[in-house]
Amino acid sequence: MALNGALGKQNVNTLNKCKILMVGAGGIGCELLKNLVLTGFTDIQLIDLDTIDVSNLNRQFLFRKEHVGKSKAQVAKESALKFNPNASIVAHHDSIFNSEFGVDFFKSFTVVLNALDNRAARNHVNRMCLAADIPLVESGTAGYLGQVNPIKKGLTECYECQPKPSAQKSFPGCTIRNTPSEPIHCVVWAKHLFNQLFGEEDPDEDVSPDTEDPELTADAGKSALDSEAKKDAIGGIERKSTRAWAVETGYNAEKLFNKLFRDDIKYLLSMETLWKERRPPQALDFHDLPGKDLQSASTRSTDVWTVQECGDHFTRCLTALKEDLAKRGEDGMLVWDKDDHHAMDFVTSVANIRAHIFGIPLKSGFEIKSMAGNIIPAIATTNAIIAGAIVLETLKILFGKIDKCKQVYLNRVPNDRKRLLVPCALDPPNPKCYVCSSKPECVARFNTSKITVKTLQDKILKGHLNMIAPDVEIDDGKGTILISSEEGETEDNEDKYLSDFGVVNNTRLKCDDFLQNYSLVVTVAHVEKLDGELEFEIVGDLSQCHPEEDGDSSAASGAPAAGKAADDEDDLIVMEDLELEDKEMEQSQGESVESRKRPAEDVESPAKSKRKAVAAAGDSEDLIEIS
Amino acid sequence: MEDNLENITEDEAELYDRQIRLWGLDAQRRLRAASILLIGLKGLGAEIAKNIILSGVKAVTLMDPNMIDEEDQMSQFFVSSAPVGQNRAVASAAPAQLLNPMVKVTADASNPSDKEDEFFAQFDVICATGCKTSLQCRLDNLCQERKIKFFSGDVFGFYGFMFSDLGRHEYLHEEIKRKKKDGQEKEEEGITITREVTNFSLLENELKFDWKADSPGMKKKIRQTPSAFFITRVYEEFLELHGRRPAVSTMEMDTKELQNLRILVLNKLGVPAKCIPEDFYQYGYGELSPVCAIVGGVLGQEIIKAVSQKDAPLDNFFFFNGVNDEGMVDKISV
């Protein structure tokens, strides 16, 4: 606990009176809690839903091996109390989305500090702090990079003032199904296969050859299909779900293998146009795999398996996963988890077998886990630095000097102004922000006769606009209720299309979230078809939107693309290093904070104002590795 | 570079998973072969100890001849609630060891000034915190002779610095290059790895820099030098003269002395008065925990870089000024 005098003229006793809410007790959280307690804060509440994993221990220093499996919030509290037994720390092993933590709860704090690892929770806390009008210090790290953003309603940008690109990079379906060229394509396919065989079936995750590949002329695809269907009975299974067929065969490894890696590949080969300028794939037979005679002694996850070893692991994992599935009962299903050894080894073996077929380099289980699990590398030192910067900004807020607050970015190497830590001036709120402006509005572009009420609720309002329990009313003069957050009131609407309710181009939907104290008007822009495979697209800034008459849409520039919801709850991050111009990209996928702010003191070289660290907002556990 | 390093075990791969994904297996192998001497176990020392022990080095010796004092409560988390009067290094060793059972942590309560030069030869890295400039220079010189990686650093209230001398340091530099493949629209990313060398200079040479020299660009040089460099020189002067740091308990007396030393340092260096703000002393008492975290985070990462021979090291000072959030890297002698 700090001694008076150490904080300059500021009185340490002020800190005793502050009530701090810390959201997240992970990588940044552990460091932050230590700093807070030592600096002299004595009234702290922390929330974290997570439990401790071995892979946390390299940086989350309040946890030790014997704590694995226990609540992060609870153990962090116990460890931090040893630093100052007189502090009062309340630990909530709970979700921040829980309605117990409403606006009144947030209002009871002096300041809220985020130490989170996913965008959904960040969005939610941002809204709660706006609703409660409590200052928030937002933060994130990824690898060597990090950032701290102080946020105050009406004074600064909120967390959602700038659009962020889709959380997850998606690949065209035909690349995944027909023409993979990189390891990541095989990994995505392997995860899709897992879900097809054991998890929730998703038509977007088809693993069979795609006859609608735009590279194929209509005829070529069709004739391949016809000839295949004729000469090979297995071709007929296309019309049956992969799952149903797998169940019929009893998850027989040989049959599955030969269907996926021999027959489907032969079928792909029959689409000759695909292979005119590509290396054609080579079909494999279950009983004749390369590397059969090689006995590699190693079992380390960092070694690359031979194709034969992949085949063996494929067989082993199929059996194990089949048993896991059986334990779930009749309609049970498995959820892919990077930390489940069978699920992970299944994806490693399948991805590598497919990589071999397409002449793509094979990868170790360790590397594939990075890609499949979207793991963001994380280290103690970056978290320590960022947690230190959070406290320094918090002190300014508490001592009435919020005007002196800065966004702080941690770079990997110093910029050309020698700065490793770059303080940047805070930007004022975006008047068109669909979250913090006085009348939040946004535009949703989609085909009204293809979007169901359920899609609106789950994918658009909850998935994309981060509402928790939305109520939706059509602004049609009649006040037609489309969605009610009360259970059972509007469930009959779920499978109907929006056009069934008279929703057309320019219809306004009044969306409310009671918990977040948030009202948003969504204006519908009807388009027949969106670019790529997008189902819908959200445009936050209305001036960026130009609804079109016909289906030939051009994606509004700067709009966040509404991709599929990330299939892992931890999300991704992009960072652009300062050396963007020097082509020193750190990483390239996932979430990015799209801000392009000027360094606070950078007045002498406006040309360089764009050379700005844009670190990620996430101590995320997740990353897609550059392959 | 030696290739006879043992492979990482599955247990290590699991524990160090998230960092191996950042710096790679070779870097991790080098880390776990390194023995480090950490002198000074105040707030900054505790942060560095935590960071390097977590990273999985082979052994860390914690050395501090001093007793726990009241100021440790605000930044030294190993002993922040321990009774005053116990030796800092000895009291820190047990809680430090708990951070990572795979690292050998030992304590040494002796005074580094009393150690023979030979004692230091057993370490791969020596990091001196809270030491007088004269001791830092002595250690740096003997480290250079013995090809030991040398670091020093300190924190005074909101201010802090780090210095490193890695001698002739070889490292691998990774660069991600984007290039277009023929016939493809998309840019492909490829990683190129090059072997680079940086030659460091001695601390005493850095501090000999002649600010009075009438050379072109000197005004710009002074303007662009981080304020925390000039400010920390005042505290280093205090430490050298009095053998202790300014303390909260003797604030009134120490403030006067700091004001005197400010003038002395300005004159000695021959730099304009504005290089050290008049009210600087208000922000320099105790060691602020967040500042220790920042300087200790940077310093810890530099030790990891030096040992793992991965990535360009910071050459050769890092200065932090918590009053204006500035964290800058500079080489004074250039």
Image: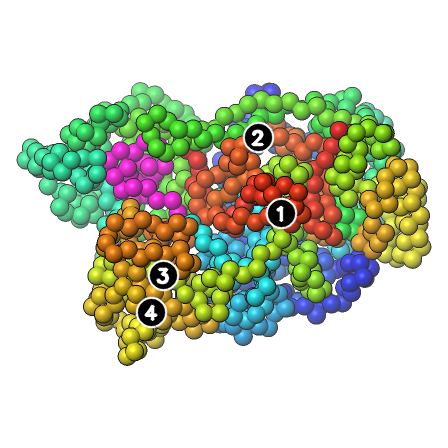
Q: Residue at x 83, y 39 (%)?
A: B131
| Residue identified by numbered label 3 | A443
Q: Chain of mark 4?
A: A
Q: Indicate yes or no whether the magenta region holds residue A181.
A: yes
Q: Residue at x 80, y 58 (%)?
A: A8
Q: Is residue A580 visible?
A: yes
Image location of residue A276, percent across then percent down? 22, 25
Structural distance between the alpha carbons of marks 1 and 2: 33 Å
| Residue identified by numbered label 1 | A599
Q: Chain of mark 3?
A: A
Same subunit: marks 3 and 2: no
In the rendered view, tell whether residue A594 sits above or below residue A473: above
Quadrant including the N terminus of chain B: top right
| Residue identified by numbered label 2 | B27
Disc on res. B319: none
Start and end of the magenta stretch? A166-195
Q: Are marks 3 and 2 in contact (CB under 8 Å)?
A: no
Residue B218 or residue B68, whichever sits in front: B218
In the displayed image of the protein, which residue is found farthest to the bottom? A478
Q: Indicate yes or no whether the magenta region holds residue A122.
A: no
Structural distance between the alpha carbons of marks 1 and 4: 39 Å
| Residue identified by numbered label 4 | A509
- Which image quarter: residue A452? bottom left
What amino acid is found at the position of numbered circle 2 in the picture? Ala
Q: Chain of mark 1?
A: A
What amino acid is found at the position of numbered circle 1 in the picture? Pro
Same subunit: marks 1 and 4: yes
Q: Is A161 displayed left or right of A406 in the figure?
A: left
In the rendered view, tell whether residue B100 sits above or below residue A480: above
Q: Residue at x 49, y 49 (%)?
A: A594
